[in-house]
Image: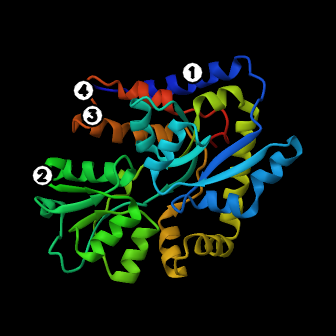
Amino acid sequence: MRIHRRALIGAALGAAGLAACGPALAQSAREVRLDWATYNPVSLVLKDKGLIEKALAPEGITVRWVQSLGSNKALEFLNAGSIDFGSTAGAAALLARINGNPIKAVYAFSRPEWTALVTRPDSGIKAVGDLKGRRVAVTRGTDPHIFLIRSLRAAGLTERDVKLVLLQHPDGRTALDRGDVDAWAGLDPIMAAAEIENGDVLFHRDPAANTWGVLNVREDFARQNPDLTRKVLAAYEEARKLALADPRELTRILVAATRLPEPVVARQLARTDLSQPAIGKLQAETILDAGTALLDAGVIPAGTDVGAAVQALIDPRFGPAAP
């Protein structure tokens, strides 16, 4: 199946524009539930500064925070209706949307290189091909999982050629350092800690195969509360600008939230671009590339219209406009 990128992007933005012209439903929410995640630095600034609480207090709307340990957990919370906004990788959001999770990606909180394949310095693993028959820790349904699948495919392997050990990201690092697995599909800042504290090696990196960090909203929440959704994203924008304006304060906030040493946080931030928050064509292209690779690898069911799924996922109406 060939997907024409220009047609996709035009259709996505056109559909969003038409939807924006429709009648807005009355705001009904009295509480907003958001996740915070160590892989989403903007969420930590937002929480630390109380920006959403300040913005919504005049309307009597309360805010509840829930920690997400990975994209898979954020997506579970969104699908269950236990949070309204959740932080994930773009490709993970696409897989969730294809599998029936009714979410919209409405904001790009970062363009990170937050995943790579990691091993111990004494494992003998130097390249992806060396993983054949080895045990690899991974968190299913996250960008590291998708990165692993794509890396294996590029090396002529599939998931069946390795022994997957399904663990949450912190437990994956622990399993690697204990010798319970041979490699780990890592995620920052835990990955940066493994490098600095244990000398673990990022033996396979590909920044272009890391999909954007996106903020997702439950589709029904955005439909019923469009003005409130815009206010949440406006507060996100305020937090992002604060993060860029004061790197020292951003580092302090991340150190306090993660309880990781400052050099670890500095390594994470050096791999994280917070400068492009508008969601649209750039994210669509990256997510489409990942989705097409997963379709070719058989991870996404044959016959899936990946382009239509990307179009259904991305909604630029509520956040900042692209420059």
Q: Amino acid at mark 1?
A: Ala
Residue designated by label 2 = 161
Q: Amino acid at mark 4?
A: Ala
The location of residue 25, given as percent across then percent down, is: 74, 22
**Placement of the C terminus among the 4 image quadrants:** top right
Mark 2 or mark 3: whose residue is earlier in sequence = 2
Mark 1 or mark 3: whose residue is earlier in sequence = 1
Mark 1 secondary-structure assignment: helix
Q: Amino acid at mark 2?
A: Asp
Q: Quadrant of residue 226?
A: top right
Front residue of 195/21: it is 195
Report if residue 158 is visible in the image: no
Q: CA distance from mark 2 to mark 4?
A: 21 Å
Q: Is residue 212 left or right of residue 194?
A: right
For discs 1 and 3, the disc positioned in front in the rendered view: 3
Q: Is residue 132 left or right of residue 48?
A: left
Q: Which mark is residue 15?
A: 1
Q: Amino acid at mark 3?
A: Leu
Residues under numbered marks 2 and 4 in contact, where contact means CB atoms less than 8 Å apart: no
Q: CA distance from mark 4 to mark 3?
A: 7 Å
Q: CA distance from mark 1 to mark 3?
A: 24 Å
Mark 3: few, some, or many residues within 10 Å (few <14, many ≥20)?
some
For discs 2 and 3, the disc positioned in front in the rendered view: 2
Mark 2 secondary-structure assignment: helix
Residues under numbered marks 4 and 3 in contact, where contact means CB atoms less than 8 Å apart: yes
- Residue at position x 40%, y 81% from top? 196
Q: Which mark is residue 302?
A: 4
Residue designated by label 3 = 295
- Residue at position x 73%, y 54% from top? 238
For discs 2 and 1, the disc positioned in front in the rendered view: 2
Q: CA distance from mark 2 to mark 1?
A: 41 Å
Residues under numbered marks 2 and 3 in contact, where contact means CB atoms less than 8 Å apart: no
